[in-house]
C-alpha cells in the first residue's frame, strides 16, 4: 500500500540558559522537538510524515503550489506565521519571495488538507505572537483566531468532552472518555464548522476538535498540544492517541 505523504512543520525550539555558580557562570544551548511522541505513534500508519522543524521551515517550507501538491496534507503545529512569511531571502536580503500563507489557502481551495494543532505558536499564540488572525491560513480554518494571547492554561487539568456523533470517522472507536489535558488555544467557531469535542463546561465548552471545508479541500483543528506540556503522558500512553491523530488525517485527506 502506498503511504500518503504528509508534511508536518513546526514543533521545535532552541533554549538558552545561564548557569550561575557563585562567582562563575556559563551559558548552555539545548535543542528540543515537540513532535517526537506523535511521530513515533504514527510510524506504522498509512502516512509517510516528513517532519520539518521550525528553524528549517523558515527556509525550506514549500514556495510553490506545485511543491505543496506533493503532499496529501500539511500540518502546522506550534509554528508562527512569521516563520512562513519571512523567508531568509526576504528577512536578510530584502528580496521578494512567495507568500506561503496565500499558497496554503490556494492548496486547500484546490483540494488539499490543512491541519493546525495547538501550542504557544499556533492560532494566535503566546502574547499574540503566532499571528494567524486575519491571514489566508485563517480563511481556511473552521475557526477564527482571537486578536490577542489565546492560551488557556489549565494546570489542574480538564477532561475533553466528546460532542460529535460516535459514528463520525474521526471519533469511531475512541469512546467518550479521553485522558486529561492541561491547556489549549481559545478560538471562535465559524458558521458551518463541525465540533467533535470541546473543553470542559467549567472553561466554557470551547472548541477542542473541529472540522471544516474550504473550496474543494478540508481542514481540521485540534486546539491542544500533540505532546508535553498541554498533553500529559497519560494521553500519550492512551491507546486512542495514535488512532485519534491518524483519524484526523484520514478524514482530512478523504476524497
Image (cartoon, rainbow, N blue to C red):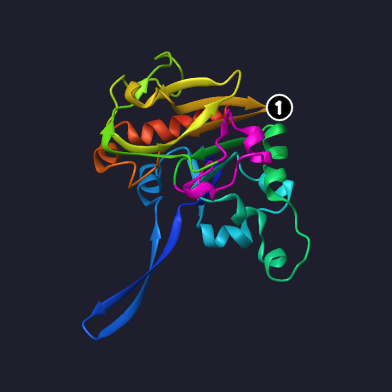
Residue 102 % position (x, y): 72, 44
- In the picture, measured across the screen, residue 230 lies left or right of residue 2, that is left
- In the picture, measured across the screen, residue 100 lies left or right of residue 43, that is right
Residue with the most extreme bottom position: 23
According to the image, label 1 marks what residue? 215
In the rendered structure, which segment of residues is drawn in magenta? Answer: 120-147
Label 1 SS:
loop
Question: In this figure, what is the number of numbered marks?
Answer: 1
- In the picture, measured across the screen, residue 111 lies left or right of residue 199, that is right
Residue 207 % position (x, y): 45, 26
Looking at the image, which residue is at 40% across and 37% down? 184
Queried whether the magenta region covers residue 226, the answer comes back as: no
The answer to which quarter of the image holds residue 227 is top left
Queried whether the magenta region covers residue 129, the answer comes back as: yes
Residue 238 visible? The answer is: no
Q: Nearer the viewer, residue 165 or 148?
A: 148
Q: Nearer the viewer, residue 234 or 141?
A: 141
Looking at the image, which residue is at 69% across and 49% down? 100
Looking at the image, which residue is at 31% across and 19% down? 176
Residue with the most extreme right position: 96
Quadrant showing the C terminus: top right
Residue 103 % position (x, y): 71, 45
Looking at the image, which residue is at 45% across and 57% down? 12
Residue 216 % position (x, y): 69, 27
The answer to which quarter of the image holds residue 182 is top left
Residue 93 visible? The answer is: yes
Query: Few, some or many C-alpha atoms within 10 Å of disc 1 (few <14, some 14-19, many ≥20)?
Result: some
Residue with the most extreme left position: 22
By secondary structure, the bulk of the magenta-drawn segment is best described as loop
Amino acid at each position: 500500500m502506498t503511504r500518503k505523504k504528509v508534511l508536518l512543520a513546526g514543533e521545535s525550539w532552541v533554549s538558552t540558559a545561564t548557569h550561575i555558580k557563585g562567582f562563575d557562570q556559563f551559558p548552555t544551548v539545548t535543542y528540543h522537538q515537540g513532535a517526537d511522541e506523535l511521530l513515533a505513534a504514527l510510524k506504522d500508519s498509512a502516512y509517510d510524515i516528513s517532519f520539518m522543524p521550525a528553524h528549517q521551515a523558515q527556509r525550506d517550507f514549500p514556495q510553490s503550489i506545485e511543491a505543496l501538491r506533493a503532499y496529501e496534507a500539511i500540518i502546522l503545529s506550534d509554528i508562527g506565521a512569521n516563520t512562513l512569511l519571512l523567508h531568509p531571502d526576504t528577512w536578510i536580503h530584502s528580496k521578494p519571495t512567495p507568500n506561503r500563507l496565500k499558497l496554503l489557502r490556494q492548496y486547500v481551495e484546490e483540494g488539499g488538507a490543512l491541519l493546525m494543532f495547538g501550542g504557544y505558536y499556533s492560532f494566535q499564540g503566546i502574547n499574540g505572537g503566532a499571528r494567524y488572525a486575519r491571514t489566508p491560513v485563517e480563511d481556511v480554518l473552521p475557526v477564527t483566531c482571537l486578536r490577542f494571547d489565546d492560551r488557556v492554561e489549565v494546570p489542574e487539568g480538564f477532561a475533553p468532552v466528546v460532542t460529535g456523533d460516535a459514528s463520525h470517522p474521526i471519533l469511531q472507536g475512541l469512546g467518550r472518555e479521553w485522558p486529561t489535558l492541561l491547556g489549549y488555544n481559545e478560538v471562535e467557531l465559524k458558521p458551518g464548522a463541525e465540533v467533535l469535542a470541546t473543553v470542559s463546561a467549567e472553561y466554557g465548552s470551547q472548541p477542542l476538535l473541529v472540522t471544516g471545508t474550504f473550496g474543494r479541500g478540508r481542514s481540521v483543528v485540534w486546539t491542544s498540544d500533540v505532546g508535553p506540556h498541554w498533553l500529559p503522558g497519560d494521553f500519550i500512553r492512551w491507546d486512542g492517541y495514535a488512532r485519534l491523530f491518524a483519524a484526523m488525517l484520514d478524514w482530512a485527506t478523504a476524497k
